[in-house]
């Protein structure tokens, strides 16, 4: 019988010396080529993933808490009105002021002082609303100036986080534009715009005609809200033409996410100019893709954080995320005008370069617009 025990340390060493080396293990490892830098699309998707995750976490935490703390505010149904005409404008203004006052009473009875105060301010005798709806986030379409006699009209479309509670800051921009238009009107003297023999008559419409997305939300990353907003914006422009006529010069001034709305509504829209300010993109890759006969303008302030938004789009889970080409890029093809040193909320700031240029666009003084 052969007895076998465990090999000794000496035996293991001897076996190791006599085992032939494996050539595959001794070959040098070839150097790996450096990885190519990530493409803009890849960088966007990584950044988007982080943004979506942050938004979803915020929604999961904040929305239930805020919903529990603030139940839905009661409000009356909007006034039932036919499309406005020059003869019925005052009737519409009166009906919507009454609706806003009733909404204020209902919000106060509900215990929401902030909404009650906002609604009450809109019921003031000096306010002129074509539309008022106090339900949910709220909708409001307000006229500044004499719309019945206007031949130069600006329609402002706001971006994210514009609700009845925050409407005041949106209206402030519209009021600043109307004031500046009035001052420029006087400078036209007896010749008016385009060499006409009378001063132009101007009006500004603050169009909060859609449910804007929240800045911290997944909806602000997609075109969904814009697609919902495009049909009512088209209807409004059609109704506006019924008031001011086909000869009036109508400009659509779109800010931030509002530029996505205008991009979705642009096709065949009966306006003379569309100005895109502080835009994350329109969902279109070029002016021609907007399929409109309007002149397309674009501007971005030097201090606007929107410059950091990647101008690409991608399909994720059947949803298009991102808004495509940068409207101020040469490839997009817009008429890029100067917006000065302002930030994302400064395009309608009194005294700003951007406000002056926007007013020139509204008046049709395109040769006076300073280019970037």
Image (tube, rainbow, N blue to C red):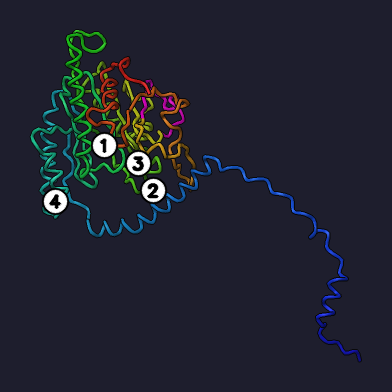
State which mark lies toward you, 2 or 3: 2
Q: Which of marks 2 and 4 is nearer the N terminus?
A: 4
Q: Answer left or right for 150 relative to 357.
A: left
**In the displayed structure, would residue 145 be above or below residue 15?**
above
| Mark 3 element type | helix
Residue closer to the observer: 267 or 278: 278
- Which numbered disc flags the more N-terminal residue, 2 or 1? 1
* Distance from Cα at disc 2 to Cα at disc 4: 29 Å
Q: Earlier in the sequence, mark 4 or mark 3?
A: 4
SS at badge 1: loop
Q: Mark 2 points at which residue?
A: 218
Eye-nearest disc, 2 or 1: 2
Front-most of 189 and 93?
Answer: 189
The disc at residue 225 is: 3
The N terminus sits in image quarter: bottom right
**Pointer 4 with pointer 3, Cβ within 8 A:** no
Residue 238 in percent (x, y) is at 28, 26
| Side of 18 relative to 238 (left or right) | right
- Circle 1 sits on which residue? 209
Element marked by disc 4: helix
Q: Position of residue 33 (x, y in %)?
A: 68, 45
Query: Residue 97, how many percent across, how many down?
Result: 11, 37
> What span is colored magenta in the figure?
282-299
């Amino acid at each position: 019988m052969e007895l076998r025990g465990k090999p000794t340390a000496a035996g293991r060493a001897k076996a190791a010396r006599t085992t032939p080396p494996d050539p595959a293990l001794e070959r040098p490892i070839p150097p790996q080529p450096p990885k190519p830098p990530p493409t803009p699309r890849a960088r966007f998707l990584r950044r988007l993933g982080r943004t979506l995750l942050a938004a979803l976490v915020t929604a999961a935490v904040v929305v239930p808490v805020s919903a529990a703390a603030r139940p839905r505010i009661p409000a009356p149904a909007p006034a039932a009105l036919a499309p406005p005409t020059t003869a019925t404008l005052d009737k519409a203004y009166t009906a919507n002021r009454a609706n806003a006052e009733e909404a204020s009473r209902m919000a106060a009875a509900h215990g929401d002082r902030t909404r009650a105060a906002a609604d009450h301010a809109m019921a003031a005798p000096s306010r002129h609303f074509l539309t008022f709806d106090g339900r949910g986030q709220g909708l409001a379409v307000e006229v500044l100036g004499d719309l019945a006699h206007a031949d130069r009209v600006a329609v402002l479309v706001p971006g994210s986080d514009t609700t009845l509670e925050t409407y005041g800051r949106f209206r402030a921009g519209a009021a600043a534009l109307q004031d500046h238009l009035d001052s420029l009107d006087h400078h036209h003297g007896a010749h008016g715009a385009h060499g006409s023999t009378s001063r132009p008559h101007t009006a500004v419409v603050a169009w909060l005609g859609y449910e804007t997305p929240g800045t911290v939300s997944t909806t602000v990353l997609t075109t969904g809200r814009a697609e919902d907003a495009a049909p009512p914006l088209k209807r409004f422009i059609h109704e506006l033409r019924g008031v001011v006529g086909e000869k009036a010069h109508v400009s659509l001034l779109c800010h931030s996410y509002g530029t996505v709305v205008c991009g979705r509504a642009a096709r065949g829209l009966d306006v003379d100019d569309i100005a895109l300010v502080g835009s994350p993109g329109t969902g279109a890759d070029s002016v021609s893709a907007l399929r409109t006969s309007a002149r397309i303008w674009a501007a971005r302030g030097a201090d606007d954080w929107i410059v950091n938004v990647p101008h690409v789009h991608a399909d994720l889970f059947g949803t298009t995320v991102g808004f495509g080409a940068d409207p101020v890029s040469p490839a997009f093809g817009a008429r890029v005008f100067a917006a000065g040193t302002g930030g994302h909320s400064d395009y309608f700031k009194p005294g700003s370069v951007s406000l002056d240029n926007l007013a020139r666009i509204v008046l049709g003084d395109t040769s006076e617009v300073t280019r970037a």
